Amino acid sequence: MSSSYANLLRGVLDLLILKSLSWDARHGFAIAEWIESATCETIMVEEGTLYPALHRLESKGMLTSVWGLSENNRNAKFYKLTAKGRKRLASDSAEWDRHSEAVSRALQLTDTNPT
């Protein structure tokens, strides 16, 4: 996998994590469940991918975290979006929309001349 593709996937995961937290705080497992559900199980997030991403976003000031009890009465770390994270979600969402629309247009072309 090329580093640019890995960066793209990392960016998509970060964007989905930020979106999952745009309503309320969630623990890691709930974030993974939300992503899987929201993408109709097209994107399945494993712990080895999710938790490094959460720690990276937290270290960049996009998230804060507190320990609490999950719905199963277990200790869990709950992540919450910060103002910086909300700003990043808005800008990255707009960028994603712009790029995904452009790629979709290109993939729908049936001629070598796009004009």
Image (cartoon, rainbow, N blue to C red):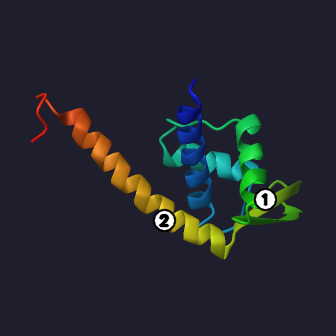
Q: Residue at x 86, y 61 (%)?
A: 69
Amino acid on which the number 1 mark rests in the picture: Ser
Amino acid on which the number 2 mark rests in the picture: Ser
Which of the 4 image quadrants contains residue 70? bottom right
Element class at badge 2: helix
Task: Give the percent coordinates (x, y) of residue 37.
Answer: 54, 46
Choose between 55 and 38: the one closer to the eye. Answer: 55
Task: Give the percent coordinates (x, y) of residue 17.
Answer: 62, 54
Which of the 4 image quadrants contains residue 44? top right
Q: Is residue 114 visible?
A: yes
Q: Residue furthest bottom?
A: 83
State the residue position of label 1.
59
Give the left or right position of residue 69, taking residue 93 as reference: right
Q: Quadrant of the N terminus?
A: top right
Choose between 34 and 113: the one closer to the eye. Answer: 113
Q: Is residue 27 above or below residue 62?
A: above
Which of the 4 image quadrants contains residue 43? top right
* Numbered badge on residue 91: 2
Give the left or right position of residue 40, taking residue 58 as reference: left
Disc nearer the start of the sequence (2/1): 1
Task: Give the percent coordinates (x, y) of residue 102.
Answer: 29, 46
Q: CA distance from mark 2 to mark 1?
A: 19 Å
Q: Is residue 94 above or below residue 34?
A: below
Element class at badge 1: helix
Instruction: Verify CB contact (< 8 Å) between mark 2 and mark 1.
Output: no
